[in-house]
Image (tube, helix red, strand yellow):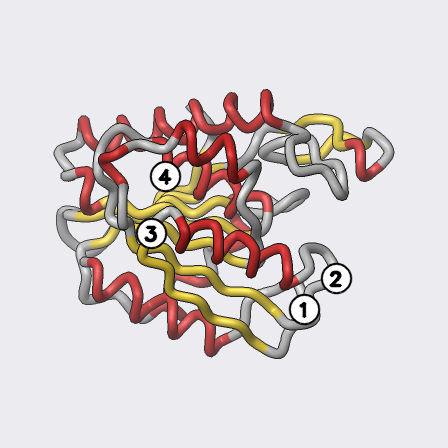
Amino acid sequence: MLEQIVIEPDGPADSCLIWLHGLGADGHDFEPIVPELGLQDLALRYIFPHAPIRPVSINNGEEMRAWYDFEPHSETAGADDMQVSSDAINTIIESQLDAGLPSERILLAGFSQGGVIALYVGLRHPMRLGGLIGLSTYLHDPSTTEEERTDANLALPIFLGHGHGDPMIPIMRAATARENLIRMAYDVEWHDYPMGHQVCLEEIQAISDFIRRIL
């Protein structure tokens, strides 16, 4: 199983949020968001996995933590890596099911590359999940997603947040993901903010509200 940081609630957990970091970061990247979400009254377990280290083409083959090899302007690059990462996240989901959590109490979140994987895993998962959170991200290969998605997660609640001035993933790419997901009948909640490739306090509050509604 992937190395991971786990933050437990005060008592026994009845729900879980698996949060995937972006390219070149690690699980510690979003660890500070836990108190900022203000969900201490929920029995929510947080899991922050570390992506494996792999060469990344966009950075001249330099090795870093990455969920898949990223090539700009490609809709389908990295598909094999994505499947490997998807299998690894599904193993974490399985561990939470084995620990007694209902699948509907498990949420996936991800930033940038991590958001791509969160959407990839969640839309294909054979059991009903609680919801998906995609931040500063996009939908990989919409046509294949439509073929491979499962009935279990039809109309799943999905939170998408993006910055107007994102230089890494232009907001139009995120808006295209939104339109594809709406067309596939998912319950998409869209938020955009005057920021770049990052997360802002207003967005964190909206994420907190989203999680609270589901749980």
Using a 10 Å C-alpha cutoff, classify the residue at mark 4 as few (fewer than 14 neighbours), some (14 to 19) or many (20 or more).
Answer: many
> Circle 2 sits on which residue?
167
Name which residue type carries label 3. Tyr
Indicate which label's residue lies in the foreground, 1 or 3: 3
Toward the front, the furthest residue is: 183
Q: Nearer the viewer, residue 26 or 200?
A: 200
Q: Are marks 2 and 1 in contact (CB under 8 Å)?
A: yes
Circle 2 sits in a helix, a strand or a loop, which is it?
Answer: loop
Q: Is residue 147 visible?
A: yes
Residue 167 in the image: x percent, y percent? Answer: 74, 62
Indicate which label's residue lies in the foreground, 4 or 1: 4
Image disc number at residue 186: 3
Pointer 2 or 1: first along the chain: 2
Using a 10 Å C-alpha cutoff, classify the residue at mark 2 as few (fewer than 14 neighbours), some (14 to 19) or many (20 or more).
Answer: few
Q: Residue at x 43, y 50 (%)?
A: 181
In the depicted structure, whether residue 133 falls above or below residue 57: below
Q: Nearer the viewer, residue 73 or 63?
A: 73
**C-alpha span from label 1 to label 3:** 26 Å
Pointer 2 or 3: first along the chain: 2
> Circle 1 sits on which residue?
196
Indicate which label's residue lies in the foreground, 2 or 3: 3
Q: Residue at x 52, y 49 (%)?
A: 28
Circle 1 sits in a helix, a strand or a loop, which is it?
Answer: loop
Name which residue type carries label 2. Pro
Q: Is residue 7 visible?
A: no
Residue 54 in the image: x percent, y percent? Answer: 69, 26
> Circle 4 sits on which residue?
122
